[in-house]
Amino acid sequence: MKEVLIIHYSQSGQLTEILNNITSPLNAKEVNITHLEIEMENPFPFPWPKAEFYGAFPKTFKQEAQKIKPIPENILNKKYDLIIFGYTIWYLTPSLPTTSFLKTPEAKQLLNNTSVITVIGCRNMWIMAQEKMKRQLKELGANLVGNIALVDRHINHISVITIAQWMFSGKKKRFLGIFPKPGVSQKDINDSTKFGNIIAKHLHSNDYQTLQNELLKEGAVKIKPFLITVDKRANVIFSKWAHLITTKSEENSSKRAFLVKMFKYYLLFAIWLIAPIVFILFLLTYLPLYRQIQKDKVYYASVALKE
Ligand SMILES: Cc1cc2nc3c(=O)[nH]c(=O)nc-3n(C[C@H](O)[C@H](O)[C@H](O)COP(=O)(O)O)c2cc1C
């Protein structure tokens, strides 16, 4: 009997549904599955009031752990053959509940010396967050063997509009009846069971050498090179904003509220005005940078970590 632990935090249940589908083929195959849902001492709201949504930015981006509820002893007392670690992305970074869990001594106890498959359910901007995750997992002594990233496949600007509507209303519905449904499509969520069969095979042979390549053949990760460029640039700018907000204002102060509001306006400006310019620059440099772009695509789809 193999022991598998599934760890995750999901607000709407989208990531929960993805994980349930991915792991459903494991149930029939001599696998004992344990679930750990990360719970905050002070839960984040869902749907989000706008001020709290933007207010979560500095701590999320700076990966400042918050208190989580204790992890049950019966989960900690077992040794797992595999951990399937589901997480969402907040501000180009693993969500704050995810970071809060990773920074506990219990995370070290569970993840150290254990094979881990990460499963991401987000809008579309996850690449640099996964690099942060790779580093965290390395620090914890975990062995990252696979990654599956399910995203909203609509064009960037459409998904910005629809996800905002979803996050602020709590309803995963077609905005105004004309926009597509937000988030990961129901078809991609339903089809994700295909990954479970591949995982089961590697779990039983205890050999994960070819796992990621097999997952990639089934479309576990699709890299859009333009989004790598945007993600990298936005990380540089976000780090300046996070530094400015946290050094120039106290938490819960009116100055903090003001700076967060400025960040919000900047974000809208960046999405609607800067991103299209970056896209034009990306197209102009596509041919000269073609080889580098192809190399980046291979690297970011892999579980390797550049030193
Ligand atoms: C505060 C916040 C920031 C987010 N930032 C990003 C982001 O930078 N990139 C991205 O692809 N998705 C982002 N998302 C979308 C989430 O990754 C995720 O798809 C969504 O919250 C639904 O996940 P759930 O399973 O927790 O309901 C953000 C969501 C929230 C709440």
Image: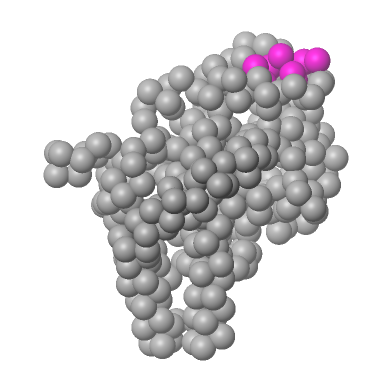
Q: Is residue 265 above or below residue 53?
A: below
Q: Is residue 51 visible?
A: no
Q: How many marks?
A: 0
Q: Give the x, y percent position of residue 158.
A: 28, 46
The answer to whether residue 237 is left or right of residue 268 is right
The magenta segment is 198-205
Residue shown at 79%/24% (left/top)?
A: 209
Q: Give the x, y percent position of residue 307.
A: 79, 53
Residue shown at 81%/21% (left/top)?
A: 207
Residue shown at 50%/23% (left/top)?
A: 192
Q: Is residue 170 above or below residue 27?
A: below
Name the one closer to the observer, 131 or 295.
295
User: Please, which colouring scheme is shown?
Assistant: one colour
Viewport quadrant of the N terminus: top right
The answer to whether residue 51 is left or right of residue 16 is left
Residue shown at 53%/37% (left/top)?
A: 223
Q: Quadrant of residue 203?
A: top right
Q: Quadrant of residue 74?
A: top right
The answer to whether residue 175 is left or right of residue 131 is left
Q: Principal SS element in the magenta part?
A: helix
Magenta span contains residue 162: no
Magenta span contains residue 201: yes
Q: Give the x, y percent position of residue 70.
A: 66, 54
Judged from this view, the residue extending furthest toward the front is 288
Q: Is residue 287 visible?
A: yes
